[in-house]
Image (cartoon, rainbow, N blue to C red):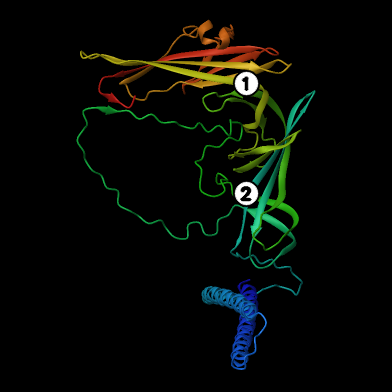
Amino acid sequence: MLRAERIRLETARDAVVARRDAATAELAAVTEMATAALRDLAIAATRGITAPAPGAALAALDAHSAAVRERRVLADLEAGELQAALARLDERIALAEAESGEQAARLVLDLHAEAAAEVAIAIGYVVPGAAWRPYHRAVLVRGESGATVEWQTTACVWQATAEDWDGVDLVCSLERPSLGVAPPDLTDDELRARRRPDTIAVEAREQELHTTGLGGEGAAGAPQVPGIDDRGLGLTLAAPRATVAADGAPHRVPVGGFTSPAQIDLVAIPLRSPWVHVRARLTNTGAAPLLAGPVDLVMSSGYIGRTEVGFVAPNEKLHLGFGPQADVRVHRSETTERDDAGLLGGWNVQTVRVAVRLSNLGASAREVVVTERVPVSEVEQVEIKVAAPDAYRLGADDQPRGEQIAQVTARAIDDRGLVTWSVALPPLGRRAVALEYRIRSQRGVAGV
């Protein structure tokens, strides 16, 4: 590729140099014509002969000479730029030639057999510039008898080994030939003592709850590792014959799949998104686990987006989101009131009130699972108390345009601080849920 680029630059430079030489020759001819014209005018003046419009002829020669000079200067500049580009390209070629090299190996096999016979020998070797990653595709199909998810697992393969793989049997392995070749570098852990502060600094953090695998007969709990996470199973996925060009571009080859019945829910997390999302709960009914990787989401309307999935063991359940439900709207509002402690001590109290309103714009009834979050304290100096379900009632002043909206109070709270309501929305109907909790912190606690 670099050689072809050099040939292209040399061709362009030669063309520019030819234009510059032609402009130089033309300028010399114009200069000679101007000199001859001036000489003829001088001779005619000595003989008393008046030349017709001598100024116009000289002006035309000057204009022609200026145009030719401009073309020569531009060609000269372009030739210089091309020459500089050639010099830079020569440096790249020299560097590439210094770094590149062909590695050759010779394999000697000694076969000992009791009797003469024909045998087939398979030799495996590792080459750089080839890799694969799992890539999934989930198609949600809704019918009168229920919903199903058609899952397809593909191997996204790309290689730049300078040799095209034409009609080869692909075996995608999770072995890492280079893993554990060199031990990690050890560094010193420095411990320092510091004075205990007078105030207690409380830091609020958000923690993600990983629920890709919801548990099952084959659920595994090993920590994630870099690369492809196989939980130490050492899987090998076989693919049909495929052709993979040595262009470094990704090629997707199917390696497995299954079809599973799905339970469809509408979920709303107003703190994160103003949309109500379609969630499918399905089971990995395939014989092999699902490896962590991206997932293309497809519905009856076509491709709708992309998500990611973690490691899912066989017979393990997982949740998969298929985008927002268009005919359901969610609006969330939050107010905070603070009551600081006085000079004599006491507790600082924050009262947080959250109101979530849902609207069904469709002609069909919907059931939406609404989830809100309550902070969870890990220190005794901070207390969080959730009020009763009917402690915060939305009045006419809290409703848009003063309309009265039915409020749902039945809820569930888990130990992680997640509050869940199951809201039944009638056709073209509206519902609301409300949450109130108090955060009490002692004096001297910062960050709350």
Residue 160 image point, x, y percent: 63, 63
For mark 1, what is the residue?
329
The three-letter amino acid code for the residue at tag 2 is: Leu
Q: Secondary structure at mark 1?
A: strand
Q: Counting other residues with Cα less than 10 Å from the Cα at mark 2, is it few (<14), some (14-19), or many (20 or more)?
A: some
Q: For residue 186, what is the image quadrant?
A: bottom left
Q: Secondary structure at mark 2?
A: loop
In the image, taking residue 306 as reference, residue 380 lies left or right, namely left
The residue closer to the viewer here, 327 or 297, is 327
Q: Is residue 326 above or below residue 19?
A: above
Q: Quadrant of the C terminus?
A: top left
Of pointers 1 and 2, the one earlier in the residue sequence: 2
Q: Residue 243, image x and y in percent?
A: 74, 59
Q: Is residue 333 above or below residue 309?
A: above
**Residue 105, visible in the rendered structure:** no
Residue 99 vertical position relative to residue 193 in the rendered view, above or below: below
User: Residue at the front extreme?
Assistant: 48
Q: Residue at coordinates 71% horizontally, 65% vertically from top-left?
A: 164
Q: CA distance from mark 1 to mark 2?
A: 44 Å
> Looking at the image, can residue 134 be seen?
yes
Is 40 left or right of 120, judged from the image as shown? left
Residue under label 2, please give it: 235
Label 1 Cα crowd, 10 Å radius (few <14 / some 14-19 / many 20+): some
Look at the image and tell me in which quarter the N terminus lies: bottom right
The residue depicted at 69 percent of the width and 66 percent of the height is 122
- Across and down, in percent, residue 379 comes to 33, 24
Residue drawn at point x = 24 percent, y = 13 percent: 342
